[in-house]
Image: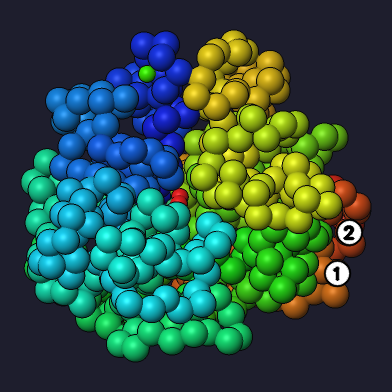
Amino acid sequence: MYDKVVYQIYPKSFKDTNGDGFGDIKGIIEKLDYLSWLGVDYLWLTPMYLSPENDNGYDISNYKQINPQYGSMEDLEELIKQADKLNIGIMMDMVFNHTSSEHPWFKQALAGDKYYQDYYIFKDEPTNWESKFGGSAWEYIENLDKYYLHLFDKSQPDLNWDNPQVREEVKNIILFWKEKGIKGFRFDVINLISKPDVFRDDNEGDGRRYYTDGPHVHDYIKEIVNDTGIEDCITVGEMSSTSLDNCIKYSGSKTKELAMCFNFHHLKIDYPNNQKWVLAKPDLKQMKFLFKYWQEGMQAGDAWSALFWCNHDQPRIVSRLGDEGKYWMESAKMLATYIHFLRGTPYIYQGEEIGMTNAHFKSIDQYRDVESLNMYQLLDKNEDRLNILGERSRDNSRTPMQWDTKIRKSWIEINPNCKNINVENQIHNEDSILNYYRKLIKLRKTYPIIAKGNVEFIDTKDDELVIYKRFLDDDVLICFYNFSDKNLEFDCDLNYFFGNYISAPSNFLRPYECAIYSKGIY
Ligand code: GLC
Ligand code: CA
């Protein structure tokens, strides 16, 4: 597991083979050679199940069918087969905190069926909890005179995991996919599944402290993993607002729940007081503290992290912590190196490997995401709402993959900078971001110190300078990163090993430079 790299595909925006504006499974098959050339081991596919696509597939109405927009079950089986030939495993996205409101279970519940009402969380009175997509977390159903809980959109009712029958349904779905040859499972917001025994108002927050890492979450995960035998698969849990102690349980060697976890604390360093919809500059001091805390803490607990900057829920990292202009190439490579030299399993999100940027939409009509559209309505009209969405919208990372210079019709507009930023331009250029990612993946597979070594952060006086050390037996790597467009002084007497500029630095790091020094490694 240690030397593996995962590539995330957002199928809707990956590769469209029939010109209907939606990426499809055949498109993924078409690009398998590219992915194998890049060197990745697993493909995490975000949901392609039957769905009204209100939250782009995270609202599932049938877990065992493929949305025809993407192709057929036969196409998916073909993808599994072809990928396997290239030694690439497919990882499916399992969304079990909630279903779509169009799922037959929920429809039965609404029709008054008590058995299926117990699959969800219906209450006579709501609490003051807020939905993660804005507004109340409860929706009133008049004919039942009850409210149901939805931590996300109202079209995503939360499942009641305390009902053993719900857990049986979940296991049955996992087994269905495992039998099809799926090698990995990503569990969507899995640390939110266990709700409290008593529902009460939260007078200090939005309710999350009552259901995050909830009372039975570890038991439920263990039960699911044991009963489906997915210990031999690669498993990753998406953990929302979680804690280190809990992640050590989720992915620690003692508890054996999941192979690894995602957490998001390092991507909230530009949320003032945890507010996503208020703009602020990234707090690099806080970033450094968080990486040290999580990297060293997970190591001490013998637990394993999923490493990432980008996914379909995050703005593009080069736009956020790098520089889209003068230092576009340097900053994209520096950010990549930072992740790929850490302790954990790196995840690459489609387009990251060519330095794709935010969308820069100018009008609300260009947005598609349910969260962005909800927030546009809820944000203060006096605020520059388009500017806020421009920085924070999840659509920033959902624009189509830039294979070449062509502006094709798509469900969401392609970024016109595909004229310059695209795979075609970079694939034969040894110095491109794309070839640099390929080198990073090779390095992890060549040097056990990168894959398995211990990690330790070193204090620095500049907030923009981050230094961490990796070590294994007698070998050492010291990794320096400049998160700014200024020259920063530094000093190291080991041998220069790797970096994002053509030559080694002298007494200072150049803008967005990363430089890795080694002892015992060549
Ligand atoms: C996860 C997904 C996100 C989705 C949410 C609700 O955070 O990554 O895209 O909207 O869960 O399923
Ligand atoms: Ca298509």
Q: Nearer the viewer, mark 2 or mark 1?
A: 1
Q: Position of residue 411 (x, y in %)?
A: 50, 24
Residue 462, disc: 1
Instruction: Using the image as rendered, state which of residue 389 and residue 356 is in the foreground.
Output: 389
For the image shown, how many numbered marks are present on the structure? 2
Task: Find numbered disc 2 in the image and state the secondary structure of the residue it sits on.
Answer: strand
Q: What residue do we see at 23% from left, 72% from top?
A: 161
* Residue type, numbered disc 2: Leu
Q: What residue do we see at 36% from left, 55% from top?
A: 156
Classify mark 1: residues with Cα within 10 Å, few (<14), some (14-19) or many (20+).
few
Placement of 252 over or under 72, stated as above or below: below
Residue 488, disc: 2
* Residue type, numbered disc 1: Asp
Classify mark 2: residues with Cα within 10 Å, few (<14), some (14-19) or many (20+).
some
Instruction: Using the image as rendered, state which of residue 453 and residue 359 is in the foreground.
Output: 359
| Marked residue nearer the N-terminal end (2 or 1) | 1
Left or right relative to 401: residue 504: right
User: Do the residues bearing badges 2 and 1 touch, measured as CB atoms within 8 Å?
Assistant: yes
Task: Find numbered disc 1 in the image and state the secondary structure of the residue it sits on.
Answer: loop
Task: Find residue 190 and report its image quarter.
Answer: bottom left
Quarter of the rendering occupied by the N terminus: bottom left
Placement of 420 over or under 368, stated as above or below: above
